[in-house]
Image (cartoon, rainbow, N blue to C red):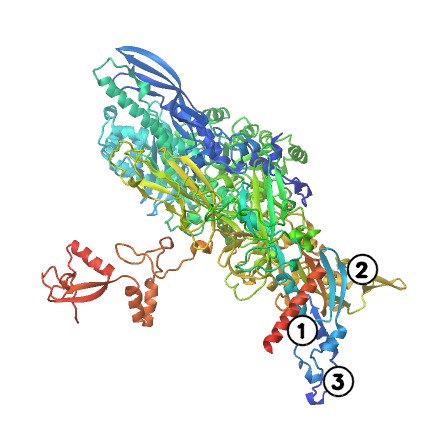
């Protein structure tokens, strides 16, 4: 296997400490490298599924366009495929690479090609023609998916394409920006969910989703009676009426279907009585009753009118996922009965209620599914447009023009539709009644971890404002599937989640073969069962993807047989089989969007993976897939986990144990995986770090210096953490670090370290600690105007002014030049007249241009450098000039730093090295942290990190601190670390004898000192500090502007005003609110109380209402107040000023 | 205990300190929880009540003060300084770090840089390269000085990686000394000045530095030849000129003549009780730096002795655990400093120290003149 070399398995693995019985850790790197890159495998799988299978299904389902006037006139799609990413401009086709697209603001998309067969009509002559590889649009391509040019490339090839080998892919490049389609969390489709509504009514609901329709059916229990609630009906319908309408005329049979147990019958009785009360006994009566309740639609389909809308609704809308074949409503009746039975069970026993927050009831919608929805909608729209045009054309009398359907296929609508949706994030699909916003986000490129974290982010189904705690709470079923630490703080807390390291999200699996397999494994078909037989004891219902297949008398054996087949690879590895004893059901699921994770299979508590398997894996003769194929490992989804007894470690396995975890630290996600010893920290600290790790500066990607991001933060000398974790090595954080190992002394120093501030050593900063590079993009467009004139860039004058100094001869700033505020970076001129036509638009005289040069605005006194200048043409073929401005900064007072334990702090002061304390060995800390940071935060992990780091530097081996890693040897134990420390002459507790650098005497305490990995966060004072004396004002109100970017004033807000009022500083209030803001002198008429004006000729104020200047007084008002008066007047409200003294 | 009036207590003997006070005065006691008596008692009348004069006497200082060089290599030295106050020892340390001048690259004129290393990062890296030259031969350059042969050293670096070649690592040996000053022409406002006159450059050397006797057979170069400055890919090139000037460590760490300089107080390990047999073995095993030895006292009895107390790193292993603090005492001698200087290479460490002494002398003189 050649692949092994490029994989980040540490070389130190062999030297690592203690081994568990069989160390299964090596499976992890194997899992993660499986196919392309494991971390975003869910995205790639989903997209690959769409591109390979989904799109074919969609096209096949809508493969015929037939002219409505002439059924012989048709177009048929015979095949569809997606080509390689390329762009065709001026009839030249160039292949695209993602990096080219990023740099030149293009969309990384590939043509969608179809084979068609169509009818051509020429002078009533009908011919059938075939065409291949007709392009119907361009599909944005997910990076590293099977259509991408990066697919299967090795590191060197990727480097040649300008791509970072550690970049996970899984996102799109649309118009030059990288866009991620977030994973969407949703409630399961086609599953019965028992819940209570707002009024406390028990209900069973099914959200049906089939290719044809989407509907929500609710059966609810109100005051003991059972009703159906469906959008298509105006009112709630008694359930017995529905049953009768579906042909279930015998009440007895309904009772039998629900269950013969009298407790169910008793609950059904009120409903039966109500139905009888309405006088409905036959199907006919029931349908008539329903007909009155069906919502009327404006359009009417004559075909439906015949049968009756009620029947149609029951057939197509009501629990739409249960198909009705040959007018056989029996499956639907049984489904309703099962729903009612579940509801009654919940009524009798509250525990039977379903938990909406249970992960097993959730489905994750991935980019593939979302794009396929979008594509389906656009494809159908395109087809109907084509049909309309053809109809129009056929209706025309002129037959001499050939009518050619293929010509009416416009490819732009699909291209633009896809592009627009991905770049705005708005999924507006009328056809599926879907209006969702914010589905995509710009990929966070702040740090490598931010990028990875963004790819695993799950966006919630609920709106964030809901004040419920349920969905936000940590669910036990999230174990191993969703990271328990990584969630934002604030309003989205607990709603936005992140996938754990080993989680896989399934894609759809073929249903047909599985169904027939179930039947051959002894599932008794529903059709053949009498109503009574359904619920006989000792038999379980078999439910496949929410559809009742039948029943089975030996559910355990049935489940085991299915599992055996799965383990031997006969059926898909992601099919889940789950026996629910309480509901007496066997659930089989093969649908997409379920979360699952791999586990080691154990027989009677003995792991199937043996030493020799692992050895073969290490030697490279065995892959993760081999483990799967040989039934050593299997994927379990959340539901099936309920049937398993999973041991954490092999040693803890009991005879009943069915599975063993691969590695406990995989319950955490990528972001939380960076934290060393997270299991020793207080839990919120880990959550804080997850948020902060995304703001840390460091390396972004190997190609970071070739990128043109709007804002890029880099660290000049990033380091690999001394205390690593396995996750760090797996995801490649050790190659793209975001921080530096700082020697930290935990002590108090000066007064500048209160409130978590840190004291820094100036010499460390001199030597490059915390130095960072900020790159900003500036751009200019050489616009072309409708009258064919265009902007021009001209060379600077011979004798250059100071501001023109950095311009090259072409009028564009030269790379490498130092750029200061007010420097011109592009010497551009715009034609004065951009509307009227000129005879020679290119040869305008100089006087016809006005200067629109652009000057650099940045912090005063800082020297930034023009890093790169790129010229490209944008989508309108205008010349676009992009400048990358680089600014290298050393830390200053106020810059924010944080360790990996949610301990953030700003730099409080910078102190000379000679004033810093030093140890017996001459070690001087890089920064000093106040010990008050520890007691309330309880971040023991940080202390262990310090110890481990210290031991690491003294013995020359990277130490590990993986979560829960002590038993399996993925984290060094404190005892062992202490021993190492002692061996190298340090105290076991990490505290050193320190001399004060100021007095030269030893300090009266031993100081806890050692290296801790510190991150520099993106919040820097230089970008935030702001003060203003006088400055710009807003035009409308004449008050000072707001915000730093507009050089705004600092607001004296309501609360500050309250303080001043309470204090009684009236003159100060007057000065702040009026004189320093928007004083204005007005002329007030004492008679009418309205505002007048000042006549400069007559040198007197005049009231325009009274037409006289006799009773005018001058007074001062805030301009905003004057504005208010005038606005009120414009609304016919007259504010009058009554002056007491004038 | 019977109550005794304070007046009835026997007199404290006058003239010398009682042993416990003497111990506190001269030793830092390193207990397992925290060191105590770390401060030095400077007040001359601190022990007046027992009739001890604590003032510092010059003749006594001259008699007791002693410097003993333990180790001296090209770049670092270790010496003992006995009979001195920590504040003085610290003054030397501080001066060494921050106030002894050296030469370091301060200005970098970049003519071309197509490498991946950004200009300012490259300049920063160059600045940190220690230069082997005696800074005493140069003058400080103040703000409006023109760079000349007395205050500036010019280096040139011009490397190019061949288009079809392997990657190239630029090391500090590529920095070439330009004894005649800068070669880059100064950009003038008027280019029309007569071409015959010598092009002005960024420096104004009156003579070549090679002609100066100090450098004639001692060319200026970076101290180490293998410091990595940058790495070049095929076709990349760096061309620059670096100007080194004299400066002090307090301005920027690059001018610090030492990687670090520090001292530690002489460790003193005392056995308070006889530690014998298994205990002795345990004690010997405890110490990671072998401070203790075992001595045979005959009759098969063994006893622990303190053999190499100087090596003690104060890991406090020997006083860890029950009762060990009763047996072993860790102390530091307050007026005995083991001083270490690690030079960056501009000057040998012993010269650095004498320079530091001179600077302190200067300072004292300045204080005296200011006071008088
Ligand atoms: S403190 Fe440590 S090094 Fe010193 S004597 Fe005791 S054990 Fe040995």
Question: Is residue B121 or residue A213 the one in the foreground?
Answer: B121
Q: Position of residue A1090 (x, y in %)?
A: 15, 62
Q: Do residues under tags 3 and 1 come within 8 Å of each other at their CB atoms? A: no
Q: Position of residue B133 (x, y in %)?
A: 66, 55
Q: Position of residue A440 (x, y in %)?
A: 40, 39
Task: Give the label, 2 or 1, closer to the camera.
Answer: 1
Seen in the picture, residue B341 relative to A654 is either above or below; the reply is below
Compared across the picture, whether B314 is left or right of A93 comes to right
Task: Give the label, 2 or 3, closer to the camera.
Answer: 3
Q: Give the class, few, some or many, for how many residues have Cα within 10 Å of label 1's Cα (few <14, many ≥20).
A: many
**Mark 2 belongs to which subunit?**
B
* Lower position in the chain sequence, tag 2 or tag 1: 1
Compared across the picture, whether A462 is left or right of A486 comes to left
Q: Is residue A56 visible?
A: no
Residue furthest right in the image: B299
Question: Is residue A334 or residue A961 the one in the foreground?
Answer: A961
Please name the residue that numbered disc 1 is placed on: B40
Seen in the picture, residue A29 relative to A929 is either above or below; the reply is above
Q: Is residue A284 visible?
A: yes
Quarter assignment of residue A190: top left
Badge 1 element: loop
**Mark 3 belongs to which subunit?**
B
């Amino acid at each position: 296997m050649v692949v092994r070399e490029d994989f980040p398995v540490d070389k130190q693995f062999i030297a690592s400490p203690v081994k568990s019985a069989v160390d299964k850790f090596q499976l992890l790197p194997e899992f993660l490298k499986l196919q392309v890159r494991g971390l975003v495998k869910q995205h790639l799988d989903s997209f690959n599924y769409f591109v390979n299978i989904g799109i074919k299904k969609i096209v096949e389902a809508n493969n015929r366009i037939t002219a409505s006037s002439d059924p012989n006139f048709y177009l048929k799609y015979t095949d569809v495929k997606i080509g390689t990413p390329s762009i065709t401009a001026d009839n030249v086709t160039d292949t695209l690479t993602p990096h080219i697209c990023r740099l030149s603001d293009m969309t990384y998309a590939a043509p969608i090609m179809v084979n068609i067969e169509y009818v051509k009509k020429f002078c009533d002559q009908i011919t059938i023609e075939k065409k291949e590889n007709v392009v119907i649009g361009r599909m944005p391509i997910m990076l590293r998916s099977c259509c991408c040019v990066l697919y299967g490339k090795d590191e060197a090839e990727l480097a040649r394409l300008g791509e970072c080998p550690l970049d996970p892919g899984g996102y799109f490049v649309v118009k030059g920006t990288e866009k991620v389609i977030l994973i969407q969390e949703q409630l399961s489709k086609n599953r019965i969910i028992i819940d209570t509504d707002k009024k406390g009514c028990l209900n069973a609901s099914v959200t049906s989703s089939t290719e044809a329709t989407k509907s929500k059916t609710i059966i609810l229990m109100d005051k003991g009676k059972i009703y159906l609630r469906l959008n298509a009906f105006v009112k709630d319908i008694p359930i017995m009426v529905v049953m009768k309408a579906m042909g279930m005329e015998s009440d007895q049979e309904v009772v039998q279907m629900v269950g013969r147990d009298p407790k169910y019958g008793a609950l059904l009785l009120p409903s039966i009585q109500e139905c009888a009360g309405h006088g409905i006994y036959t199907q006919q009566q029931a349908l008539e009753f329903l007909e009155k309740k069906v919502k009327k639609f404006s359009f009417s389909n004559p075909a439906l009118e015949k049968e009756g809308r009620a029947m149609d609704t029951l057939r197509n809308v009501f629990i739409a996922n249960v198909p009705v074949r040959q007018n056989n409503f029996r499956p639907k009746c049984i489904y309703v009965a099962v729903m009612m039975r579940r509801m009654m069970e919940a009524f009798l026993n509250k525990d039977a209620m379903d938990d909406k927050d249970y992960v097993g009831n959730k489905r994750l919608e991935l980019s593939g599914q979302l794009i396929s929805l979008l594509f389906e909608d656009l494809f159908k729209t395109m087809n109907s447009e084509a049909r309309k045009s053809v109809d129009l054309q056929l209706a025309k009398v002129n037959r001499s023009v050939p009518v050619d359907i293929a010509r009416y296929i416009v490819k732009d609508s699909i291209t633009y539709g896809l592009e627009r949706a991905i770049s705005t994030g708005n999924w507006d699909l009328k056809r599926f009644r879907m209006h969702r916003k914010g589905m995509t986000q710009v990929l966070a490129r702040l740090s490598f971890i931010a990028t990875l974290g963004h790819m695993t982010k799950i966006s919630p189904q609920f709106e964030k404002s809901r004040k419920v705690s349920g969905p936000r709470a940590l669910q036990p079923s999230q174990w191993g599937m969703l990271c328990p630490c990584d969630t934002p703080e604030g309003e989205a807390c607990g709603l936005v989640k992140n996938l754990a390291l080993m989680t896989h999200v399934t894609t759809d699996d073929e249903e047909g073969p599985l169904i027939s397999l179930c039947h051959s494994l002894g599932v008794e078909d529903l059709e053949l069962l009498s109503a009574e037989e359904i619920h006989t004891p000792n038999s379980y219902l078999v439910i496949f993807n929410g559809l009742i297949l039948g029943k089975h008398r030996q559910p355990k054996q049935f489940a085991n047989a299915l599992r055996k087949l799965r383990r031997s690879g006969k059926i898909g590895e992601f099919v889940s089989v789950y026996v629910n004893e309480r509901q007496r059901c066997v659930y089989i699921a093969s649908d997409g969007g379920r979360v699952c994770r791999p586990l080691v299979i154990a027989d009677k508590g003995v792991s199937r993976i043996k030493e020799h398997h692992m050895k073969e894996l290490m030697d490279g003769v065995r892959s993760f897939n081999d483990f799967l194929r040989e039934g050593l490992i299997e994927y379990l989804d959340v539901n099936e986990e309920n049937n398993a007894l999973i041991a954490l470690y092999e040693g803890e396995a009991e005879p009943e144990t069915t599975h063993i975890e691969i590695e406990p630290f995989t319950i955490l996600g990528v972001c939380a995986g960076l934290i060393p010893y997270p299991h020793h920290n207080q839990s919120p600290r880990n959550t804080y770090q997850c948020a902060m790790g995304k703001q840390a500066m460091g390396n972004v990607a190997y190609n970071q210096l070739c990128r043109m991001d709007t804002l890029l933060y880099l660290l000049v000398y990033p380091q690999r953490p001394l205390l690593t974790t396995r996750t760090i090595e797996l995801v490649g954080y050790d190659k793209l670090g975001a921080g530096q190992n700082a020697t930290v002394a935990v002590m108090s120093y000066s007064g500048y370290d209160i409130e978590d501030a840190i004291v820094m050593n100036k010499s460390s900063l001199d030597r490059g600690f915390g130095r960072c590079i900020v790159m900003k993009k500036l751009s200019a467009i050489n616009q072309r105007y409708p009258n064919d004139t265009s902007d021009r860039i001209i060379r600077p004058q011979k004798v250059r002014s100071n501001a023109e100094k950095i311009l090259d001869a072409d009028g564009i700033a030269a790379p490498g030049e130092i750029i200061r505020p007010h420097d011109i970076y592009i010497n551009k001129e715009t034609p004065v007249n951009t509307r009227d036509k000129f005879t020679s638009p290119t040869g305008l005289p100089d006087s016809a241009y006005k200067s629109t040069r652009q000057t650099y605005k940045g912090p005063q006194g800082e020297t930034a450098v023009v890093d790169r200048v790129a010229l490209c043409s944008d989508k309108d073929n205008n010349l676009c000039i992009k400048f990358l401005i680089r600014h290298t900064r050393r830390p200053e007072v106020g810059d924010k730093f944080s360790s990996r334990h949610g301990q953030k702090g700003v730099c409080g002061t910078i102190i000379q090295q000679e004033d810093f304390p030093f140890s017996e060995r001459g070690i001087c800390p890089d920064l000093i942290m106040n010990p008050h940071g520890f007691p309330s935060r309880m971040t023991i992990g940080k202390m262990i990190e310090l110890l481990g780091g210290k031991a690491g530097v003294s013995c020359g081996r990277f130490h590990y601190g993986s979560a829960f890693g002590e038993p399996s040897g993925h984290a060094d134990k404190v005892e062992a670390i202490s021993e190492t420390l002692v061996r190298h002459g340090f105290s076991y507790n990490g505290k050193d004898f320190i001399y004060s650098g100021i007095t030269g005497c030893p300090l009266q305490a031993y100081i806890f000192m050692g290296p801790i990995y510190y991150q520099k966060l993106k919040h820097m004072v230089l970008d935030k500090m702001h003060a203003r004396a006088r400055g710009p004002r807003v035009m409308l109100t004449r008050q000072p502007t707001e915000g730093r970017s507009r050089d705004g004033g600092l607001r004296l807000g309501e609360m500050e005003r309250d303080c001043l009022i309470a204090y009684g500083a009236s003159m100060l209030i007057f000065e702040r609110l009026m004189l320093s803001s928007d004083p204005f002198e007005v002329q007030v008429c004492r008679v009418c109380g309205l505002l007048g004006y000042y006549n400069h000729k007559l040198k007197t104020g005049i009231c325009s209402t009274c037409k006289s200047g006799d009773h005018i007084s001058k007074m001062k008002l805030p301009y905003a107040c004057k504005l208010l008066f005038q606005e009120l007047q414009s609304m016919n409200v007259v504010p009058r000023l009554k002056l007491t003294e004038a | 205990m019977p109550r005794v009036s304070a007046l009835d207590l026997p007199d404290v003997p006058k003239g010398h300190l009682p042993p416990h006070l003497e111990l506190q005065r001269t030793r830092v006691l390193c207990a397992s929880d925290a060191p105590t008596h770390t401060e030095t008692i400077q007040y001359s009348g601190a022990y007046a009540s027992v009739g001890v004069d604590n003032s510092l006497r010059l003749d006594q200082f001259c008699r007791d003060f002693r410097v003993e060089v333990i180790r001296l290599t090209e770049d670092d030295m270790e010496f003992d300084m006995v009979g001195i106050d920590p504040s003085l020892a610290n003054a030397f340390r501080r001066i060494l770090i921050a106030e002894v001048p050296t030469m370091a690259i301060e200005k970098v004129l970049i003519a071309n840089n197509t490498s991946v290393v950004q200009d300012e990062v490259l300049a920063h890296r160059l600045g940190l390269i220690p230069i082997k030259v005696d800074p005493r031969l140069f003058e400080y350059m103040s703000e409006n000085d023109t760079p000349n042969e007395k205050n500036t050293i010019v280096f040139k670096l011009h490397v190019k990686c061949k288009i079809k070649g392997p990657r190239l690592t630029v090391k500090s040996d590529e920095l070439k000394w330009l004894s005649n000053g800068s070669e880059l022409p100064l950009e003038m406002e008027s280019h029309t000045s007569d071409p015959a006159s010598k092009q002005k450059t960024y420096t104004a050397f009156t003579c070549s530095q090679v002609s100066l006797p100090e450098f004639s057979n001692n060319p200026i170069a970076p101290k180490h030849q293998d410091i990595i400055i940058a790495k070049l890919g095929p076709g990349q090139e760096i061309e620059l000129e670096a100007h080194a000037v004299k400066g002090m460590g307090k301005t920027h760490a690059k001018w610090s003549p030492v990687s670090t300089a520090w001292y530690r107080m002489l460790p003193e390990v005392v056995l308070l009780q006889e530690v014998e047999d298994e205990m002795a073995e345990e004690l010997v095993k405890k110490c990671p730096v072998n401070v203790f030895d075992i001595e045979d006292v005959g009759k098969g009895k063994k006893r622990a002795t303190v053999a190499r107390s100087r090596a003690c790193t104060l890991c406090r292993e020997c006083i860890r655990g029950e009762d060990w603090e009763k047996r072993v005492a860790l102390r530091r001698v307050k007026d005995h400093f083991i001083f270490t200087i690690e030079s960056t290479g501009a000057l040998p460490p012993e010269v650095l120290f004498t320079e530091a002494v001179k600077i302190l002398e200067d300072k004292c003189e300045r204080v005296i003149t200011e006071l008088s």
